[in-house]
Amino acid sequence: MGIFGSARVLAQNDRLLLGSLLIPFTISIFAGLFVYRHTARKRKTQALVTLLLSILLMPLAYQAAWVFFPTRFYIPRTYAVRHGH
């Protein structure tokens, strides 16, 4: 959204829209690995909790952004937008 400005531009290219979902999951995995490598006790439990929390908090962040910026997250469901008409 920061690069393209709105979801409408992303909706014109399915690969970009799908690729934009990989960013939060990659960040979640790195957060879990960071916690795993930097904690002394109960590493696996803390890494799993971190991974699950970040995966659960990411949709909440998207929901909050959608509530506060509805015009940027609106994706029209028409054929004309997909083909740039």
Image (cartoon, rainbow, N blue to C red):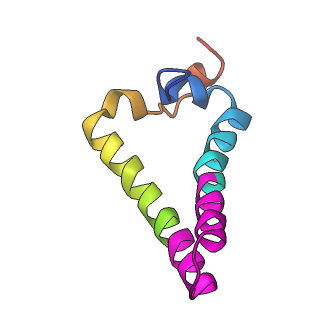
Q: Residue drawn at (68%, 33%), measured in percent from left and top?
A: 16
The number of callouts visible is: 0
To which quarter of the image does residue 48 belong? bottom right
Percent x, y of residue 42: 57, 88
Q: Quadrant of the C terminus?
A: top right
To which quarter of the image does residue 47 belong? bottom right
Farthest residue to the top: give it: 85
Which one is in front, 76 or 43? 43
Is 27 rendered above or below residue 81?
Answer: below
Farthest residue to the left: give it: 68
Which one is in front, 80 or 4? 4
Is 61 magenta? The answer is no
Is 30 rendered above or below residue 4?
Answer: below
- Would residue 15 appear left or right of 49 to someone viewing this image? right
Which one is in front, 67 or 11? 67
- Would residue 42 appear left or right of 59 to someone viewing this image? right
Is 46 magenta? The answer is yes
Region rendered in magenta: 27-52
Percent x, y of residue 23: 63, 46
Which one is in front, 74 or 32? 32
Q: Residue drawn at (66%, 66%), measured in percent from left and top?
A: 33
Q: What main secondary structure does the magenta stretch of the protein show? A: helix
Farthest residue to the front: give it: 40
Percent x, y of residue 3: 55, 22
Q: Residue drawn at (57%, 75%), measured in percent from left and top?
A: 39
Q: Residue drawn at (69%, 28%), measured in percent from left and top?
A: 13
